[in-house]
Image (cartoon, rainbow, N blue to C red):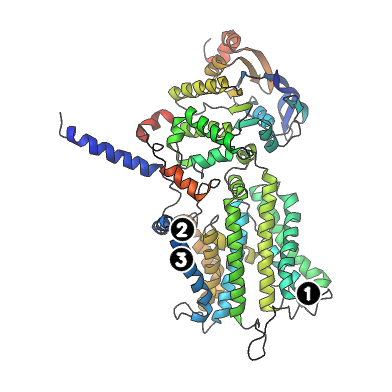
Amino acid sequence: MTLLELKNVSVSYGRIEAIHDMSFSVEEGEIVSLIGANGAGKSTTMKTISGLLNPSRGSLTFDGQEITKMKAHIRVVKGISQAPEGRGIFPGMTVMENLDMGAFGRKDRSGMSADFERVFTLFPRLAERKTQIGGTMSGGEQQMLAIGRALMSAPRLLLLDEPSMGLAPQFIKQIFTIITEINQQGTTILLVEQNANQALARAHRAFVLETGTITHSGTGKELLANPAIKEAYLGVG
Amino acid sequence: MSMSEGPKVLPGAETEKETIDVEARPKRSSGLFQPLVDKWNALPRPIQWLWLIIVVVIAYLLPILDIPILTTQPGNDWALACFSMASYALIAVGLNVVVGYAGLLDLGYVAFFAVGSYTAALLTSPDSPFAHIPYLWTIPVAMAVTMFFGVVLGVPTLRLRGDYLAIVTLGFGEIVRILATIIPALKGQVGFQNVGRPPGTAADGTPLFANSNGTPWYWLTLTIIIIVLLLVGNLERSRVGRAWIAIREDEDAAEIMGVPTFRYKVWAFAIGASVGGLSGALFAGQVGFVNNQKFDVQTSILFLAAVVLGGAGNKVGALLGGVIVAYIPLRFTAIANYKYLIFGIALVLIMIFRSKGLLPARQRLLAYGRTAYQRVISKPGTVTPPTPPEAEKGAAS
């Protein structure tokens, strides 16, 4: 079943068009990766899906419902949750307070407690640091917190914007393992990455983004094997 | 085997665990008042209440006590000075909702103060052509009118952020002042005489709330401050307060967490505005005269200075800031003319040495309240990190 669909979406910053006529879809239960270089429009795509940016043309559909004009905070309740690029945690709040903010739109106390447990099981480190101020944690811990916080809204679609950015290689592997685990627990994931190797290896399907247009698409394995992509994104010629 | 191993292992591990436990605790702020704040938080609830009652009683007795070192006599009447400090404190508490909680820089707050003053004047002064109502009724009316103005200003402008919002609010402050000058019904510099006062007569037949008698006005204002503090404190700990703090910290992140940021910003603006209007109405009543002279940009900046000086985001800090900003020029009349210079220097120093104000903002675990918070941090087994944090840092950052 198609969970998210973008049809002919264009997004502009003033007169500069960052995304041209983009169409793709995400099926329920998948991990879909968007890879591309700096300025390819990856983060713009994410912000358009989460609702922080409005497309100038085209339409977005989530779970069969048109969401093109829907405000970001309502999309969260519908089941779209984003862990923003550069972590974007609330630096002055503790770990618990950050996670609590993730559940802002929810009313079901029991479901929230279960999700707290889930996040602490996925990220034991966060459980150790419940009362630490977010801004004083290391980059990797902040990334965990950003993902954990996004999970607190019990999303159906989790948007991860460069979860590996600025992390040590060993830690990147750990983050991707957790992403796969979250997916296996039933959350659909749309992943934006510069770290193409991991992103393609973990994804069911993937798209390559170049200057605001999708240039390649296929399963993660297909794209990993594609010579042009190998050369451009994986650093092997 | 070296001397450092063996017998030292166990106590070493013990101290290590302890340091981690200490580190895991929130370190929100430090400095001058921190030991005091920590001590305060450690006190049991009834003792805290007891202390609060003592402080409140002293606050009520302040104009009567007239402590020799503190007094502003002979230059300024002490009771009136107390009223002035209370007014500034109330204003600072109101502005703190906008600037401190929601993080919206408002440089035109005096406009709401002006709207409140004029509302009270128009509804009670014999110079006004409007229907007259008892003075005490003007207080809720002034709050409602300024709240309306807050929404009117907020809805178009709160889509702006940061500097742009500051510029628009600065403009709004000027617009209100200029309107007070050019609209004939508002009487410009001539203004309104004999603004109403609360009922009551003293033993000698003069009105209890006389313009020259600061004490009853001070008591009225202090009572209102306590009510406002209780209401604001409740808001702060509620969902609304959490949303404001999230907006202040990162507006985009708040939005994608499901916070309707625009609506909550308008709320902050409206609530802040209504407290400004409230203090305006009190001020108009005490002075008994309103014209267009007191509502300039400098006054707005002075209000903002009070909040920043005291500690944006902390209602007690803002209160303290308001008191200080009002008190210093009244106490040290010799330097009163240089007050902007002095506050300017004070602000620069504060920004360098205590960038979060005298009493920095602190938040508890807002959603679950105090008891739940205590339970979380004392829950056995939750704060037992197997590795020292330093070792992980290399791999994690």
CA distance for labels 3 and 1: 40 Å
Which mark is nearer the camera, 1 or 2? 2
Identify the residue position indicated by label 1 in the image. B133
Q: Secondary structure at mark 3?
A: helix
The quadrant of the picture occupied by the N terminus of chain A is: top right
Give above or below for B14 relative to B268.
above
Q: Quarter of the image holding residue B326?
A: bottom right
Q: Residues within 10 Å of mark 3 (few under 14, many from 20)?
A: few
Establish whether labels 3 and 1 are both on one chain: yes
Q: Earlier in the sequence, mark 1 or mark 2?
A: 2
At x 25% / y 38%, what residue is drawn? B12
Q: Are marks 2 and 3 in contact (CB under 8 Å)?
A: no
Q: Quarter of the image holding residue A10?
A: top right
Q: Earlier in the sequence, mark 2 or mark 3?
A: 2
Q: Chain of mark 2?
A: B
**Amino acid at the residue labelled 3:** Leu
CA distance for labels 2 and 3: 9 Å
Location of residue B267 in the rendering, given as x and y in whole percent from the top left corner: 68, 52
**Amino acid at the residue labelled 1:** Ile
CA distance for labels 1 and 2: 43 Å
**Amino acid at the residue labelled 2:** Arg
At x 42% / y 36%, what residue is drawn? A128
Give above or below for A237 relative to B168.
above
Q: Secondary structure at mark 1?
A: loop
- Asked whether the viewer can see residue B311, the reply is yes
Identify the residue position indicated by label 3 in the image. B50
Identify which residue, A225 or B370, lies in the foreground. Answer: B370
Identify the residue position indicated by label 2 in the image. B45
Q: Residues within 10 Å of mark 2 (few under 14, many from 20)?
A: few
